[in-house]
Amino acid sequence: MNELHPSIIALVSLAANIASNHPKQGLCQVERLKGYGVSQQPIDLVVEIARHIRDESAQILDAQFAAALSGAPAEPAAPSPRERLAAIPIATAAACCTPTPSGQSCC
């Protein structure tokens, strides 16, 4: 099995920490990345995408909470994993998420 380079693991960990709103925010991964010689540009890109995913998630949760408070009908039951897989389009021009403010895709 091929192992991932430590810099890739640090980038993934950084993104996960930010997107999950972890209290440490991945700051130790930033130091590791700098130690691996990763330039600031890819670090900034990962941070931008992770923040975008975190913020988009918060907006969706806030909208669902507001709907529940207002007495709006509840969302239908979540589809099963099989139903979700069956619903994935084979080819589509639509984006799976909104782009970041600088136009980067998070998909």
Image (tube, helix red, strand yellow):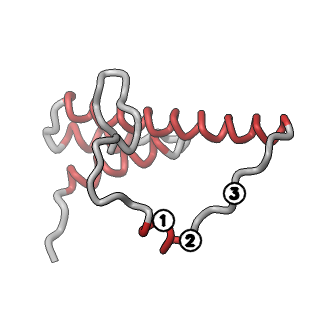
The residue closer to the viewer here, 25 or 94, is 94
The residue closer to the viewer here, 43 or 87, is 87
Q: Mark 1 = which residue?
A: 84
Q: Which mark is residue 25?
A: none
Q: Mark 2 = which residue?
A: 80
Q: Mark 3 touching mark 1, by CB under 8 A?
A: no
Measured along the vertical axis of the image, is residue 90 above or below residue 50? below
Find numbered disc 1 in the image and state the secondary structure of the residue it sits on. helix
At a point 40% along the width and 34% down the height, the residue shown is 98
Residue type (three-letter) at the residue carrying disc 3: Pro
Which image quarter holds the C terminus? Answer: top left
Counting other residues with Cα less than 10 Å from the Cα at mark 3, is it few (<14), some (14-19), or many (20 or more)?
Answer: few
| Residue 44 position within the rendered picture, expressed as x and y whole percent measured from the top left | 28, 29
The residue closer to the viewer here, 50 or 28, is 50
Separation of disc 2 and disc 1 at Cα?
A: 6 Å
Residue 4 in which image quadrant: bottom left
Q: Mark 3 = which residue?
A: 76
Counting other residues with Cα less than 10 Å from the Cα at mark 1, is it few (<14), some (14-19), or many (20 or more)?
Answer: few
At a point 17% along the width and 68% down the height, the residue shown is 3
Residue type (three-letter) at the residue carrying disc 1: Arg
| Residue 8 position within the rendered picture, expressed as x and y whole percent measured from the top left | 22, 52
Residue 1 in which image quadrant: bottom left
Q: Mark 2 touching mark 1, by CB under 8 A?
A: yes
Q: Is residue 56 left or right of residue 67?
A: left
At a point 42% along the width and 48% down the height, the residue shown is 16
At a point 79% along the width and 46% down the height, the residue shown is 73
Measured along the vertical axis of the image, is residue 13 above or below residue 34? below
Q: Is residue 80 left or right of residue 27?
A: right
Find numbered disc 2 in the image and state the secondary structure of the residue it sits on. loop
Q: Is residue 95 left or right of residue 55?
A: left
Find numbered disc 3 in the image and state the secondary structure of the residue it sits on. loop
The residue closer to the viewer here, 52 or 91, is 91
